[in-house]
């Protein structure tokens, strides 16, 4: 079989050596959102990203030596999911696609990986949040099987990254 026809990629923990690329990806995403008048991030919290890397919660999808996209996970999100956070879910946060790979179903790759990972951990849900003011992104995630749970305004606390404070979010859930 021709190797050019076989899509190969890896999901790996991000490292501190990836920080420059991760910061660039966030900056590109913010610029893209502003250029297109999309509701989105105004900033990102570099310290939070560093902590996610240290705690092995920041991931990258890599093809060859190129980072195709990044995302982070956590196993508790009581600040946002409150009483629904019962230790039976994995939470997906801050998925950012390299502009060179837009339109190549990066979210599908993330969801495939996180679904397998969550099942191996005995979890029942994949949960995430996104901007309430962006119905297109909500519908996009719903097209992958996520179900809308509720709208919520996040608290203003240093326990959340800057870009997640006082944010009106739609909570979405994918049942495994």
Image (spheres, rainbow, N blue to C red):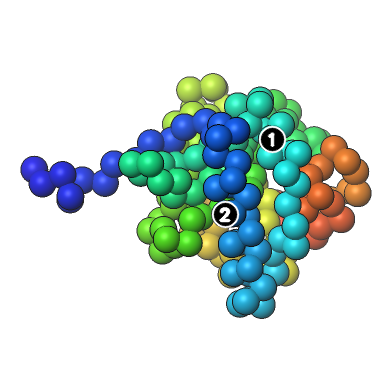
Disc number at residue 66? none
Question: Front-most of 116 and 98?
Answer: 98
Q: Is residue 121 left or right of residue 40?
A: left
Separation of disc 2 and disc 1 at Cα?
15 Å
Q: Which residue is mark 1?
A: 50
Q: Specify whether residue 155 is in view.
A: yes
**Helix, strand, or loop for circle 1?**
helix
Quarter of the figure with the N terminus: top left
Q: Is residue 68 left or right of residue 39?
A: left
* Location of mark 2 (residue): 25
Compared to 110, does 106 lie above or below? below
Residue at 17% from the left image edge and 50% from the top image edge? 5
Up the image or down, 14 lies above or below 24; here it is above
Could you say which is closer to the camera, residue 54 or residue 83? 54
Tell me where residue 99 appears, x and y as whole percent: 48, 62
The residue at the far right in this view is 156
**Circle 2: element type:** helix
Above or below residue 165? Residue 75 is above
- Quarter occupied by residue 127: top right
Q: Percent x, y for residue 70? A: 53, 45
Q: Residue at horizontal 67%, vertical 73%? A: 34
Q: Is residue 10 left or right of residue 169?
A: left
Spot the residue most to the left. Answer: 1
Snapshot quadrant of residue 56: top right
């Amino acid at each position: 079989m021709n190797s050019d026809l076989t899509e190969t990629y890896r999901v790996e923990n991000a490292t501190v050596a990836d920080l420059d690329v991760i910061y660039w990806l966030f900056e590109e995403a913010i610029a893209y959102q502003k250029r297109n008048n999309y509701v989105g991030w105004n900033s990102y919290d570099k310290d939070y990203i560093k902590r996610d890397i240290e705690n092995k919660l920041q991931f990258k999808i890599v093809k060859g030596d190129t980072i195709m996209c990044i995302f982070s996970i956590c196993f508790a999100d009581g600040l946002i999911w409150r009483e629904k956070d019962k230790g039976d879910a994995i939470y997906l946060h801050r998925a950012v696609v390299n502009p060179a790979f837009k339109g190549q179903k990066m979210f599908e790759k993330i969801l495939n990986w996180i679904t397998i990972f969550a099942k191996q951990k005995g979890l029942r849900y994949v949960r995430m949040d996104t901007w309430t003011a962006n119905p297109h992104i909500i519908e996009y995630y719903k097209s992958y099987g996520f179900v809308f749970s509720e709208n919520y305004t996040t608290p203003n606390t240093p326990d959340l990254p800057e870009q997640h404070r006082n944010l009106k979010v739609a909570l979405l859930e994918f049942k495994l």
